[in-house]
Image: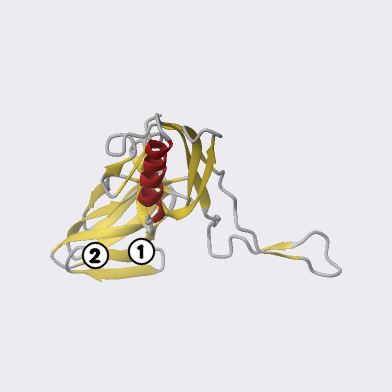
Amino acid sequence: MSGFEIDGVHTRRDLGLCCASRSISPPVKKTAVKSVPYMDGQLDFSQLGGRAYFEARTLSFAFDLMADTPQDLERQVTGLREFCAFAFDADIYDDDAPYFHYHGSFSEMEESPDEYGLSSEVTVSFVVDPYKVSNDWCEQPVNAGVNTVRNDGAWARLTVVPSGTVTIQTGSLNQTFSGETVSDIPLEHGDNRITVTGGSAVLKWRERRL
């Protein structure tokens, strides 16, 4: 594989370092269970908020660095270290996950140099949100009345671009918009029934996948 990119800087294109392998830890569901005396089993409150929640994940990249001199190797290691160490609350574009990106912060860097100082196995890790996020917006126009909006990814927050002033309602939630706004309305997985009054609008969201 090639590598990854943060803030427009790519490990291979700009640093000249080719990634040997990468890994992403599997999603782990958060659980909230309670054992109650005189009851079989347990009470599971894990989806009390209406959906499943997941722990952060670890995204790691391994590099096999080689150089003609120990000084050249140290230059490569230092360059990679400084590039990754300051990544905080950043979008991470992984070449192995095209069309999506992860969001997170640098966690740690492990180095295993050889005895001659001419090669080193280096692994950098990031703690990232459980979902990877689409690079491109999903968009759907909606008109006055009842509209069906399908979201094939996990729940996402809607951005509303209204034509004039419109009110959007889904379930018991409603909000009025007069300009482009990141709404308080979640778009759930699957088909969403959305009622629009007052005009038309374009709904935008970024698809999120585990």
Residue 134 lies, with reference to residue 33, above or below; the image says above
Where does the image place residue 136, in percent across and percent down from the top left? 27, 44
Where does the image place residue 141, in percent across and percent down from the top left? 22, 50
Front disc: 2 or 1: 2
Residue in the image at 39% along x and 60% along y: 186
Residue 154 lies, with reference to residue 176, above or below; the image says above
Total marks in image: 2
User: Mark 1 is on which residue type?
Assistant: Ile
User: Mark 2 is on which residue type?
Assistant: Thr
Residue 81 lies, with reference to residue 169, above or below; the image says above
Is residue 166 toward the left or the right of residue 32 in the image?
left
Q: Is residue 121 visible?
A: yes
Quarter of the figure with residue 77: top left
Residue at the disc numbered 2: 181
Residue in the image at 55% along x and 56% along y: 55
- In the foreground, 46 or 3: 3
Residue in the image at 38% along x and 58% along y: 88
Residue at the disc numbered 1: 185
Q: Which quadrant would the N terminus be assigned to in this image?
A: top left
